[in-house]
Image: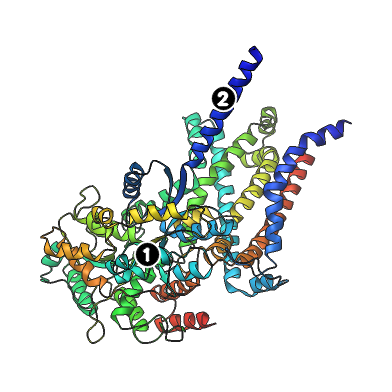
Amino acid sequence: MESRGRLLLLLPLVVVLLAVIGWPLLDTFWLSFTDARLGGQTGNFIWFDNYLHAFRAPAFRRALFVTVMFTVCTVGAEMLIGLGVGLLLDMDLWGRKFLRGLLIVPWALPTVVNAMCWRVIYNPDFGALDAFLQQIGAIKEYQSWLGDPTTALIAVGAADVWKTFSLVAIITLAGLQAVPRELKEAAEIDGAGPFERFRTVTWPVILPPLTIACVLRTIEAFKVFDIIWVMTRGGPLDSTKSLSILVYQEAFSFRHAGYGASLAMLSVAITMMLIGAYSRAVKIQGAVR
Amino acid sequence: MKRTRSLIAAALGLTAAVAFSVAAEAKTTLNALFMAQAGYSESDVRAMTDAYLKNHPDVSIKLEFVPYEQLHDKITLAAGSGQGYDTVLYDVIWPAEFAENNILADVTSRIDPATKSAVEDGAWTTVYYKDKAYGMPWSVDSKYLFYNKEMLQKAGIVNPPKTWDELLADAKIIKQKGIVDYPIVWSWSQAEAVICDYAILLQAYGGKFLDENGKPAFNKGGGLDALKYMVQSLKDGVTNPHSTEYLEEDVRGVFSSGKAAFALNWTYMYGLANTNAKESQVVGKVGVVAPPGVDGKNPIGTVNGAMGLGIPTSSQNKDAAWDYIKFLSSPEIEAKYAASSPPIWKSFYEEAAKQNRPDADLMKAEAESFNALSNRPQVPDYQQFSARLQQAIQQALLGKATPEDALNAAAADLSN
């Protein structure tokens, strides 16, 4: 009876989720096996042609590569910087409270605003970055960071790291509050150095929340769209065209709804794998506790 | 008795409620989609709409503004969902796609012969596809060559260039004299903007996007020469190398801050750069001419940047929408906002030529350009065509391929 009551309470959520996620997902799945065009007829059933075309298309492989590069590099940098800043702000520093408050600002900033700000910072004729680098003698001439295919993805990635490292730092800080003080003191009395104390006392406590943060950020980064769209729209030379941008372009600009749907489903499949990793991370955390 | 009275009161209340809701329903609501970028500004469109609503109390209009880059996708997306807008602004490159896919309603019968002959020919190409009209032209535009008069004077250049080779030579003098580092700035980002700049050069060099059979022809003759010119101007160090990440607004920023002697841009830049001291450091120093030509080929290069207002097929208020469109594109309204966007009406330019206007340079550049407007290809899959060509042009500009190889590869892809 109790379990039936619980199920009943969950029912509204399940209904809403099925309506806003389940049905569109099924519809997209069906669409991915057709040659439907946006605004046109429903299209013919063409089995796996769209998927085969995707695997053969250099544009898909390139977009997948861009997405994986973006995800690995930004999440890696966010974890490292976030962890470092989190540890730093846990120390007894002057103005620690103020700095902790400041940490939330980049995270709270809307992505589009962040992207616009960085576009101005990177501006190759008036940008602050070029001015700074020239003044310290790192570059002779102003560079076009977003106009050069070799630097564009790094530049967009840096803007994304600036916005999201603070989330990791906040999670680290929260995790650090759970480290028992007496354990730290005991380790210190036993003659453990700072690195040894971090490895044996702090790290095991903050690892589970950091793992979850890492997986969640990976899922987010893999779906990246808005920051790239505002900063480069996938250019120059498709060097920043992520999977989501390719899906958008195929489905809405070129109106290849069927093919766009197949690309979206491939993206969903990869995200599902990442969600699997998240579930595992949650289980590990549960086991640690 | 009391019960009867309550019943009467309830009935009256109900009647009033029904009458009120009927009255509310009688008010037609139009959803209109516009662009927040070049051309008529958001405040222009709001002011025009307010003027319309003053005389149409039975209509309410919901305005939506998006950047140019989202305009096409918004229109197709709304069409895909089968509901949405009653009036949409659209670009000269989309009527083929919108007509073939039944996105815009055929309004041929709504356009009378008098209107037909009074509007610039180039403007009609925005809305006509296979002899049917899919809207009313709203603005006609082309990119012009803007120049900084003071810089040219300092360099000892008396007249603005008439050919692209002259432009290159002038730019070299300006660079050599150290007036600016990079005399020319363009919008060569991976976007439609680079196609517009390329189209101007392509026409000047006598090239074609497509041959008579509709197959790509930009990889030969004038099309190839145009891209070679772009690459050469980068190699010579006279083109701002950051142009490969610039859109029109970035070009305006560089030119208005006095960091370039020459720039290609649409009409809207003239007012902002030459008269608006808040937006520009080169106020009063801006000259403008129709883009140069090439000796022995074409005396001018242009790009048709006209835009039109159409009614999506799914609109339930087509008559009201057409009335609103007719008002927005009327000669009086267009003349009033001519500083933002060139009007479609021939009479405006005839009148302007007779007056001694402060923007006489611009009027002359417009009149010359509108007589020779060149179109980008009218193909149903234009977005795909343009995306592939953008990629090829950028490959050459960024030194990743020769102009020949880049254009040949794009032509081969687009032929399939």
Q: Which residue is mark 1?
A: B111
Q: Which residue lies at the image location 53% right of the left edge and 28% below the top edge?
A: B16
Q: Position of residue B375 (x, y in %)?
A: 36, 74
Which of the two marks, 1 or 2, is nearer to us in this view?
2
**Amino acid carrying mark 2 in the image:** Leu
- Could you say which quadrant of the image residue A35 lies in? bottom right
Q: Position of residue A246 (x, y in %)?
A: 56, 64
Relative to residue A28, is residue B261 drawn left or right? left
Looking at the figure, which quarter contains the N terminus of chain B? top right
In this view, the residue in front, B24 or B95, is B24
Q: Position of residue B2 (x, y in %)?
A: 64, 12
**Amino acid carrying mark 1 in the image:** Ile
Q: Earlier in the sequence, mark 1 or mark 2?
A: 2
Vertical arrangement, residue A17 with respect to residue B136, above or below: above
Vertical arrangement, residue B298 with respect to residue A272, above or below: below
In this view, the residue in front, B308 or B271, is B308
Relative to residue A83, is residue B23 drawn left or right? left
- Could you say which quadrant of the image residue B200 lies in? bottom left
Secondary structure state at the residue bearing disc 1: loop
Vertical arrangement, residue B157 with respect to residue B260, above or below: below
Q: Which residue is mark 2?
A: B12
